[in-house]
Amino acid sequence: MEHKLTRQDTNLLKGLAIVAIILHNFCHMLPRIVAENEYTYHTFKNVQLLGSLEHGYHVGLTLLSYFGHYGVPVFLLLSGYGLVMKYERGTIGHISVRDFIFYNARKLWHLLWIGLVLWFVLFFSEHGFHAGFPTRALASLLTFTTNFIFKEPHLQMIMGPWWFFGLIMQMYVVYRLLFYRRSDAWLLGAAVVSLVLLAYAVSRGEEDQTLLNYLRYNCVGEMLPFITGIWMGRHGVIRSWTQTAVCGILFLLCCFNGYAWILTPVLLSLALLQLVTLRGTLRRALETLGVLSASIFVVHPLVRALFRPAHIAPSEAYWPLLFYLLITLMVAIVYKYLNDRIRF
């Protein structure tokens, strides 16, 4: 049965996704906690995951570390869906490439600027005013080119998770240039190209993951959930508990094969769609987090930097993790309040 996602539904899914992301970004930095297969694929990480689960070694922290990053494709799917509902199904008429790109770039700059002010404070308090300033990294962040320039951008960018700004800007540009009011054949072609390139990158072996890492940081490697969202916006959202069960099982199985792993972002995103039927306090809480999700995303790496999870033993991480969540939420509320009232 086909459905539409309401604003409340998308906020619920955004809330779930942002919680997964911020918990992942804390937990995967803890020492001796299994790292994820996100930008590259390594079999030994699967072996470590199974060993950790078998021995009951901080199972909650391990699962959040390993799977929490799948909140990113949920956001990409919702972004594709939202673009269609706004620019193809909504009341907005034709928009030029220039106006479309500038509008979305300005939206991201406005979201980011207070975060950069806070980052400057953290940077100079830690390194002093005489330290070398990462001018290139800052310029690439503001021009959304970080993902293109660096082979391993997480090593050289400002606030690691902010790599997503470059990715989402790429998606906006791709949507307007290739998909905007074009036939679904363009979606199919882009999906095929993405699959072929990712499969080729995987085929190069686990010893050479450079190409796969680069693709996954850029639009080609993250295209499938985005295209799925566009498709859903045009043809309706199909969701059911059967779909949730089937996609969930396939997701878990595909995590253990390099080629099938390419499909995991789409599978998990589809598995989560039926959660929009949640009701009660949990739904209201997730919807609230969804409204705050953009602000939470900006501030959470700044808060995380204060906690330094790489120096916290897993057995002692639970209270710091709780405080990290609470402080992130409080800062995000203030951040959104200020951002909504200060316009440029």
Image (cartoon, rainbow, N blue to C red):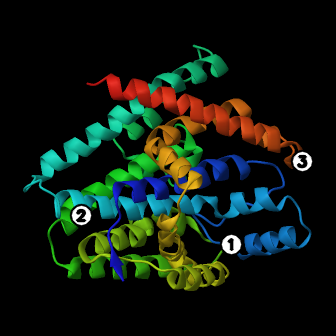
Secondary structure, mark 1, is: loop
Q: Quadrant of residue 130?
A: top right
In the image, is residue 244 above or below residue 327? below
Q: Mark 1 and mark 3: span between their CA atoms?
A: 26 Å
The one of 197 and 265 positioned closer to us in this rendering: 265
Residue 14 position, x and y percent, is 47, 54
The one of 5 and 220 positioned closer to us in this rendering: 5
Mark 3 or mark 2: which comes first in sequence? 2
Question: Which mark identifies residue 42?
Answer: 1
Question: Which mark identifies residue 55?
Answer: none
In the image, is residue 249 above or below residue 33? below
Q: Quadrant of the N terminus?
A: bottom left
Question: Which mark identifies residue 84?
Answer: 2
Q: Is residue 191 left or right of residue 262?
A: left
Q: Residue furthest top?
A: 129
Name the residue: 21% across, 48% down.
101
